[in-house]
Image (tube, rainbow, N blue to C red):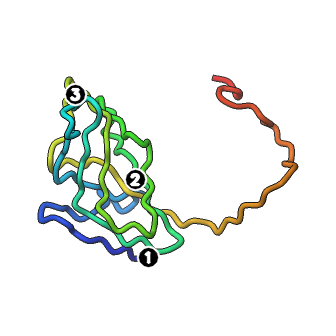
Amino acid sequence: MEIKYKKLHQLAQPPARANDSDAGFDLTAISLEYPSDGDSSLYVQARTGISFEIPKGYVGLVFPRSSISKTRHSLRNAVGVIDSGYRGEVMLRFSHDQTTTGYQQGDKIGQIVFIKLPKIEMLESENLSNSDRGQGGFGSTGR
C-alpha cells in the first residue's frame, strides 16, 4: 500500500521507520509553539510540517514514541486520530509545565500507524447478549 505525504515546510522530515519491522513511522518536530495567552503550562504544540493523503477505509493513529517516558510530557489526547478526509498538517499537543525539559526542533516526537478499518454497521437493540464480564467497569477485573 502507498500513502502520499506532502511536505508543508522546508524543515519537514519524511515520515520514516527506524527498522523495517516497526509498526509506526516517526514524526519529527519542525517547531514547538506555546499558547498565545502566555500560559505555557497548558501545552506545547509540535508541528511536523507534514500532511497525508490516507486512503478511504484507513485511519492514521498518532501515538507518542516510547522515549516520551524520559520526559514529563504526555500526549494531550492520548492517541490522535487522522481521518482519511483530513489533508491538514499533523500536529501533536503535549502536556507541559515550565519545569519540563522537553522536545526540541528536529526531535522525533511521535509516530503514526496506519490501520485498515472494518466496515461497521451500528444496530440499535433492546437486548445485548450476556458475557463473562457483564457490566463490570473500572477495576472490575482486579489489579
Crowd around label 1: few <14 · some 14–19 · many ≥20 (10 Å): few
Q: Name the residue under label 1.
A: 1
Crowd around label 2: few <14 · some 14–19 · many ≥20 (10 Å): many
3 or 2: tag closer to the N-terminus: 2
Q: Tell me the quarter of the picture where residue 40 sits.
A: top left
Q: Name the residue under label 2.
A: 62
Q: Disc 3 residue type?
A: Thr
Q: What element carries label 3?
A: loop
Q: In which quarter of the image is the N terminus?
A: bottom left
* x then y, percent, for residue 13: 20, 62
* x then y, percent, for residue 71: 27, 31
Task: Name the mark nearer the viewer: 1 or 2.
Answer: 2
In the picture provided, is 18 more to the left or to the right than 139?
A: left
> Which residue is at a point 18% across and 33% down the rendered structure image?
38
The residues tagged by marks 1 and 2 sit, at their Cα atoms, a distance apart of 19 Å
Instruction: Give the label on residue 51, or none.
Output: none
